[in-house]
């Protein structure tokens, strides 16, 4: 790289009469005898290497920031300032859960969508203003159920109502606690939540672009997107099982059951009976508000049925079913389909790592008084 820096063919600055034969060396001046094609190749090589170096430095810096933020997190973060915070949040979440089961998938999705866009900083909860379209109003976030937002807002109000806790607990931490609680309430594992996040200072719809996995993603695309956030392929497969809960609007998978390819209107990786069932629930002309369960077997239980469904061609999205059809991820699907305890351990590890993504510290964040409005 040093040699490349020393012998850079500066074609744009090269005197016209030297353009086809000169190479600028900082020590010797113009070297006559370097053909133009060689200069061009060296130029491209230098720019390519420079681009790689800059991208690598960005990755390294992002990893440093991630570790710095994650290092701030600890399970007893509010032991002195608001020791009862988890019980307060749990009561609110439990009450909301009893009112509507939608609370479970709504909170889970809210946490995931928040963390994957500029980190776990509750920026997805911020409301748009006349001068700014916030994350929550990006097309990819319009399907986030209102019950998720409502749960966090009510939990924040309950926490702040305790004099000792007033404006001491971030919205980002409340969302992380609520996520653990909805998993446990729906039959999944309970786990210790790391706390100490600050709320983000920015929320724009533009920041969502290209940062959330899409229903048609293949394994490479999924793996790359999770890796960008410090999560492994194993983490991705474990977190995908959150699709054992919740629902999807018909438009998200319509292509798989009506216009998959010129050779087959239905995706051949779909179980035929399941495809017929989906077509009956989602006709070609359907109300855009119609949604169906993502797990047709145990839609209200957090379990490993998701992986069993994939084994039988019953993954709703392409990005679900590919975890079984791709030989690289298939072993994990098969293992967790037959070992619920192993799956639960993997999920706890993965969602804990997810909660460390993009944590805000110091002047990069604060504690919002209202989760939907910047201070």
Image (cartoon, helix red, strand yellow):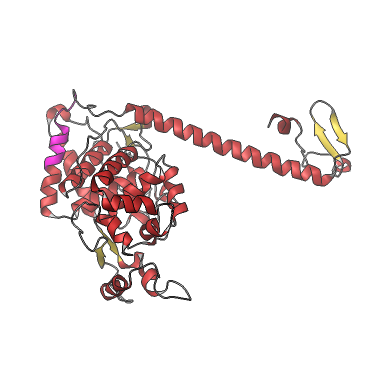
Describe residue 224's horizontal placement relative to residue 347 as left or right: right
Vertical placement of 28 versus 202: above or below? Answer: above
Closer to us: 144 or 338: 338
Q: Residue at x 20, y 43 (%)?
A: 189
Q: Can residue 82 be seen at all in this image of the molecule? A: yes
Q: Can residue 129 be seen at all in this image of the molecule? A: no
Describe residue 336's horizontal placement relative to residue 204 as left or right: left
Describe residue 153's horizontal placement relative to residue 21 as left or right: left
Vertical placement of 289 versus 117: above or below? Answer: below
Query: What's the magenta region?
Result: 81-91
Q: Residue at x 26, y 32 (%)?
A: 195
Residue 90 belongs to the span the image colors magenta: yes
Q: Residue at x 12, y 31 (%)?
A: 162
Magenta residues, dominant SS class:
helix
At which x and y percent is residue 193? Answer: 24, 35
At which x and y percent is residue 42? Answer: 75, 41
Quadrant placement of the C terminus: top left
């Amino acid at each position: 790289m040093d040699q490349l820096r020393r012998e850079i063919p500066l074609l744009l600055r090269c005197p016209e009469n030297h353009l086809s034969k000169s190479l600028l060396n900082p020590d010797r001046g113009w070297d006559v005898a370097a053909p133009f094609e060689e200069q061009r190749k060296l130029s491209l090589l230098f720019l390519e290497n420079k681009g790689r170096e800059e991208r690598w430095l960005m990755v390294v810096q992002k990893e440093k920031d991630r570790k710095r933020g994650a290092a701030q997190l600890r399970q007893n973060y509010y032991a002195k300032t608001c020791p009862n915070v988890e019980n307060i949040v749990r009561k609110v979440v439990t009450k909301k859960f009893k009112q509507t089961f939608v609370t479970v998938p709504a909170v889970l999705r809210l946490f995931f969508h928040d963390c994957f866009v500029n980190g776990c900083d509750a920026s997805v909860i911020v409301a748009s203003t006349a001068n700014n379209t916030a994350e929550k109003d990006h097309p990819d976030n319009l399907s986030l159920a209102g019950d998720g937002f409502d749960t966090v807002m009510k939990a924040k109000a309950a926490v702040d109502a305790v004099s000792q806790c007033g404006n001491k607990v971030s919205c980002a931490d409340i969302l992380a606690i609520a996520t653990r609680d909805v998993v446990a309430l729906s039959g999944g594992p309970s786990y210790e939540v790391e706390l100490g996040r600050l709320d983000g200072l920015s929320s724009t719809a533009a920041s969502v672009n290209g940062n959330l996995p899409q229903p048609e993603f293949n394994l490479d695309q999924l793996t790359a997107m999770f890796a960008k956030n410090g999560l492994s392929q194993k983490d991705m497969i474990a977190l995908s099982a959150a699709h054992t809960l919740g629902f999807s609007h018909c438009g998200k998978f319509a292509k798989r059951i009506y216009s998959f390819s010129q050779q087959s209107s239905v995706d051949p990786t779909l179980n035929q009976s399941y495809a017929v069932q989906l077509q009956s629930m989602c006709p070609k002309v359907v109300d855009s508000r119609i949604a169906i369960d993502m797990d047709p077997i145990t839609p209200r239980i957090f379990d490993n049925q998701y992986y069993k469904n994939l084994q039988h061609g019953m993954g709703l999205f392409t990005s679900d079913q590919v975890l079984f059809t791709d030989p690289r991820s298939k072993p994990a699907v098969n293992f967790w389909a037959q070992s619920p305890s192993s799956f639960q351990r993997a999920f706890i590890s993965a969602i804990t790592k997810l909660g460390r993504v993009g944590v805000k510290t110091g002047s990069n964040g604060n504690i919002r008084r209202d989760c939907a409005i910047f201070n």
